[in-house]
Amino acid sequence: MEFCIQLSPFYPDKSYGGDRVFNDMLEQAVLADKLGFDSVSITEHHLLNILMMPAPLQFATQIAQHTEKVKIITSIVVLPLHDMRIYAGEVVCADIFTKGRLMLGVGRGAFAFEMERCGVPMEATQDKFNESLDLLQRLLTEEEVSANGKHYKFDPITIMPRPITPGGPQMMMAVLNPEGIYHCTKRGFHIQTTPLAGQHELLLKQVDGFNRAKDEMGEAGKDLTLSLSRVGFVCNSGAQIADRMGKAEAYYSRFDNVFTGPGIVENGLIKELPRKQTRDELAKSLLVSTTQEMVDKLGVYSDLGINRFIFNCNFGVSQTETLENIQQFAEEVAPHFSSSMKLQMEAAE
């Protein structure tokens, strides 16, 4: 199992400055590269102070300038918000500027607040996403592409420059629904999923959807990977666990507001609303725990066949503590599952 750090911007205090938020993320990416993490991931969200990244491809190229090996995953880009004729060219440029380290994670969008205010109501996202995805793949693999669909109608065009690798960067689909995972895997996509704050039973169904598809595909699906994203923090005491869980609960009280509604946002700041789920219930679904407890939980994921674990420890903790946590995860947790990170830690001693 390989490991990824999710560079997940959280901006509850405007006085902190957006430049500092993004510099913090860049510093985390540099550390992840130094420690031997497989990848870092960046979101796309607009008009909000949680998961805030309106320009993921731009930031991917910035990360590439300051790192050497780490892959850079867009996790995810919201295709219905983009014009594929323009976006395909931006993807090619980002692939060139990152020297082939870009992995393009795509999805339909999750927050009704931002989708509707950007002109794409949630009820229209699936249809537009499907058309956009098909078109993007054609633009990256073919020349003189025309369209006569519901959302795109144009005469033949050729995206320039052409991709440096056939078909452009690898593509990963962000899917939560187990049957959706099955069908996207059958189409040949790498998969990223998460049960969010849900229970372990949902994760088992998500993994089953991926495995069923791979089994049916045989040789054609052998190289497809499943990435799992989870919020967590390596803690050293019960008091620290309690503190981090308080921060996680505040984070999810904002996340739920825009993910499941009602979508109350004032001056770009998501209002913190009471949650139905108790803190104890939330704790069971997150990886806010001691080193050994985290190793035990990740062991379950490894046994399930998860290929990449995307670790999100950016939920309101200070930059210093976040960097220390990434370091601790790399030294005490990851080597139990990743031979490359084990060798990296041994070489650093």
Image: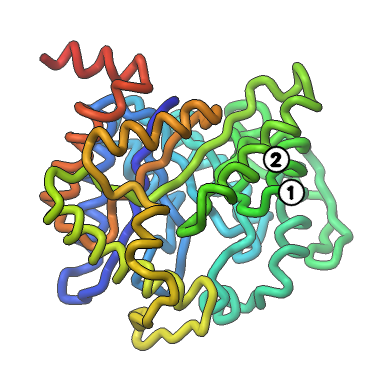
Tell me the amino acid under the disc marked 1.
Answer: Glu
Report the residue at 25% width, 33% height from top.
292
Residue 336's image quarter? top left
Q: Position of residue 184 (x, y in %)?
A: 72, 43
Q: Closer to the N terminus: mark 1 or mark 2? A: 1
Quadrant of residue 223 within the rendered picture: top right
Asked whether 120 or 12 is in front, the reply is 12
Tell me the residue that label 1 is attached to: 179
Residue at 77%, 20% (x, y): give it: 218
Q: Is residue 194 above or below residue 310?
A: below
**Residue 31 in sight in this render:** no
Q: Residues within 10 Å of mark 2 (few under 14, many from 20)?
A: many
Task: Give the quadrant of the C terminus.
Answer: top left
Label 2 residue SS: helix
Q: Position of residue 273 (x, y in %)?
A: 37, 82
- Decide: marks 1, 2 in contact (CB < 8 A)? yes
Can you say which quadrant of the picture contains the N terminus?
Answer: top left
Name the residue beneath numbered marker 2: 209
For residue 95, above or below residue 153: above
The amino acid beneath tag 2 is: Gly
* Colour setup of the view: rainbow
